[in-house]
Each structure stands twice: as structure tokens, then as C-alpha cells.
Image (cartoon, rainbow, N blue to C red):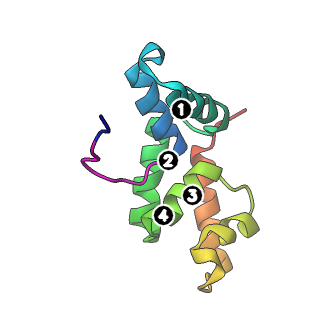
């Protein structure tokens, strides 16, 4: 019997990983196991850091949730990359603002 969605919410890759891990790998179906494998490979942050970044980017820079989630998922490393995620280039964003966003991301970036 299919499950009914209670609520729809945009989440980051690290948040999806946390949810899937909380279920327990033995409880996951084949699709969910593949999703866990994907999230494990492509998470650039832990879920707590991702949540802090989302809140910070929305509050400090007044960005849309969809933009913020993509920024957190990809963690761009240059001003040009940040620009790509902001409304697909439909609006003009000052270089100084892009640099501020990049600096904010850098503060939370994993040190490798």
C-alpha cells in the first residue's frame, strides 16, 4: 500500500543522508539504499552544518530556500559558481554580495 505524503519540504543532501541513516540500513528498500549511497558520496557537509548554513543564508542574505539548498548541496568555491545558483542569472547580483556569500560558505566548509 503506497504511503501518503504528509508534508513536502526541500532538503539538502546532508539532511537526506541523516534521515536515511536514522531509518537504519536494514530497514531501507533498494531505492533508499541507493539514495543513502549517493548522499554518502556527495554530502559536502554534515547535517548540522547544512542546517546552520541554510538559516544563515536565508536570514543574512535574504535568499530563496531553493537557492540556498542548491548552494549548500554544491558548496561553490568561486564567485562565478555562486552566481550560477542565484536565480539562474535572471537577476543582477553585485560582486561584493557574491563575495560575502562565498566568504560565508567558506566559514562553514569542511577542512580537507
Question: In this view, which residue lies farthest toward the top?
Answer: 26
Secondary structure of the residue carrying tag 1 is helix
N-terminal of the pair, mark 1 or mark 2, is 2
Crowdedness near tag 4: few (<14), some (14–19) or many (≥20) residues, C-alpha within 10 Å: some
Rendered image: mark on residue 66: 4
Q: From this viewpoint, which residue is outermost toward the front?
A: 1
Q: Which residues are magenta?
A: 4-11
Quick check: 13 above or below 60? above
- Residue 104 covered by magenta stretch: no
C-alpha gap between disc 1 and disc 2:
18 Å
Which residue is label 3 attached to?
70
The mark that comes first in sequence, 3 or 1, is 1
- As drawn, is 110 to the left or to the right of 16? right
Seen at 73% across and 32% down, the residue is: 112
Q: Are marks 2 and 4 in contact (CB under 8 Å)?
A: no
4 and 3 marks in contact (CB < 8 Å): yes
Label 2 and label 4: CA atoms lie apart by 10 Å
> Residue drawn at (44%, 37%), measured in percent from left and top?
48
Answer above or below: position of 11 versus 32.
below
Q: Which residue is mark 1?
A: 31
Residue bearing mark 2: 12
Looking at marks 4 and 1 on the same chain, the residue that comes earlier in the sequence is marked by: 1
* Mark pair 4, 3: CA separation: 6 Å
Q: Is residue 7 magenta?
A: yes
Mark closest to the chain's N terminus, 2 or 4: 2
Mark-to-mark CA distance, 2 and 3: 8 Å
Local crowd size for mark 2, using a 10 Å CA cut-off: few (<14), some (14–19), many (≥20): many
Q: Residue at x 60, y 66 (%)?
A: 100
Q: Nearer the viewer, residue 108 or 83?
A: 83
Residue 78 x %, y %: 75, 61
Amino acid at each position: 500500500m503506497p504511503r501518503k505524503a504528509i508534508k513536502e519540504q526541500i532538503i539538502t543532501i546532508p539532511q537526506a543522508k541523516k534521515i536515511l541513516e536514522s531509518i537504519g540500513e536494514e530497514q531501507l528498500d533498494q531505492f533508499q539504499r541507493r539514495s543513502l549511497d549517493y548522499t554518502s558520496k556527495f554530502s559536502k557537509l554534515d547535517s548540522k552544518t547544512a542546517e546552520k548554513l541554510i538559516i544563515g543564508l536565508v536570514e543574512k542574505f535574504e535568499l530563496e530556500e531553493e537557492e540556498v539548498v542548491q548552494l549548500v548541496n554544491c558548496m561553490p568555491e568561486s564567485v562565478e559558481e555562486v552566481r550560477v545558483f542565484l536565480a539562474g542569472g535572471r537577476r543582477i547580483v553585485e560582486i561584493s554580495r557574491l563575495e560575502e556569500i562565498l566568504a560565508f560558505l567558506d566559514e562553514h566548509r569542511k577542512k580537507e
